[in-house]
Amino acid sequence: MASAVIHRLLCLAACGAALAARAEGIVPEPLPDVHVPGFAFPESEATLTGWVAAASRDTFGAAPAVANIHVHGWGLWTALTAETKQVVDGQPLRVFETWLATDELAADPATPLVTRPRHRAPLRTLKKMSIASERPADPIADPADDPEPVNRVLGFVKFDPTAAAHIARQQLLRAAALDALLDGGAQSIPPFPATALVVKPVFQVIHAADLIDGRYFALKVWSGPPAIPQAYPPAQWPGCVWLDLVGGGNGHGAVDEFPASDGSSRTDETTYPLASIVSYRLSAADADALNQGALATKAAAGDTAVLVAMHVAGREIARWTWQTFWWTPAPDFPPAPSSRAIAGRRPAQLRGAPRHYAMAIAYTLFAPDQPYVGGENVGAPVYAYNPWIEARFAPSDLPDSQSLIDSSGRTLANNTGAQTNCLSCHVRANYNPRLRATAPRFAGLRYTDLGDAQFVGTLQVDFLWSIARHAR
């Protein structure tokens, strides 16, 4: 009897220790209910596809359908940027920050990861895809594109708990598992559940050496696409705002159009407090991880990472929902590919720094919408891209682009970053270990038939290039 009691006490002690250890790790949190009127997640596929169909046609129901789509995008943003009760280094984590990054899942994809050590996922230099093999190649922020290291962006791909569980259960980041599917005759990986969310947060790290007077940082600002379609990386954007890491500034939309490198052009109107942008301070562990994994990085504890952009994809419909966000000094009047109409539908529940971001939506490619199979490369183009991610793309980065003749008879090359659409590129995502030259590659805005012969001999990866490029 005594031994049984002792055994039970030992079990309870072990359980308590396990729970304590678990509490010390970051726990991935599900998308919370933020009580945004008109927003539900996951929304039914029938409802969403109905909105897409109506919004892409010149009908009586187009305007309310467009409004519903905008509200849905903002609802997702409000929820995934909400602060949680979890704290790291004295700083609260937002919902998306608790999610698992690709590297964390790829480390042991066969084991569902519930918690991880009490530190943030390490930032990595964002990569392009190798045109030949669909494997990581040159960094997006290559010095040849961005000669100023201060303009380099870093980030990662993260998965909500249900998407992470699906990856772990199906071993989707194991090349051997993908090869087995392909060798067995599968055309696609098992589809993600309707609750799956995937995000690509993009940060810029502000080093102490980058500051003017120990407090001001010149952050490049997107003012809209170039008049002539071309690669347009941040280094070429003319204007900037000044972030005050100490907290000052009275900026409400003003931009320093001719910034002086010594900060002499800065005014109070072109200065914005750090509280206006989502950010966090790097710990010593963050800085060490960044210095080990990124190109020419000299991060140190106390440096600041600011969220300049984020892609958000949801598997609520077969072609996913696609919305992208970037920081802007004038969130009420954002430039294209966002709009004043989109900004006007931000919910009251969206407060603080996340309200300072613009949004672009890509739930369709054209108006009117084209079917999943048997469609054509016709219609009014829907451009939706992120200035910090795609705007730098040149025709060489989008080798499978296809021109389009619009309703006015103009020929649109659709082969630069400002002529892209999230859906048009991700619909082409495939795992191509056999290096088939005909396999789909990156492209600007264009139609792709889900049954296209280009996919033969490859494995479609449910619209996620991150699966193909990170499988080990």
Image (spheres, rainbow, N blue to C red):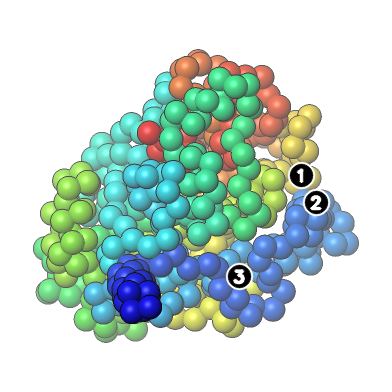
Q: Contact (CB < 8 A) between labels 3 and 2?
A: no
Residue 443, position as x, y percentages in the image: 54, 33
Mark 2 vs mark 1, CA separation in Å: 6 Å
Find residue 28 and report its image quarter.
bottom left
Residue 81, position as x, y percentages in the image: 47, 70
Q: Contact (CB < 8 A) between labels 2 and 1?
A: yes
Residue at 21%, 81% (x, y): give it: 246
Check disc 1 and report its element: helix, strand or loop: loop
Name the foreground residue: 422 vs 415: 422
The image quadrant where one finds the C terminus is top left
> Which residue is disc 1 drawn over?
369
Q: Which mark is residue 361?
A: none
The image quadrant where one finds the N terminus is bottom left
State whether residue 323 is above or below residue 416: below
Residue 68, position as x, y percentages in the image: 73, 66
Mark 3 vs mark 1, CA separation in Å: 23 Å
State whether residue 156 is above or below residue 469: below
Q: Earlier in the sequence, mark 3 or mark 1?
A: 3
Q: Residue furthest front?
A: 1
> Which residue is disc 2 drawn over?
53
Name the foreground residue: 58 vs 245: 245
State whether residue 186 is above or below residue 77: above
Mark 3 vs mark 2, CA separation in Å: 20 Å
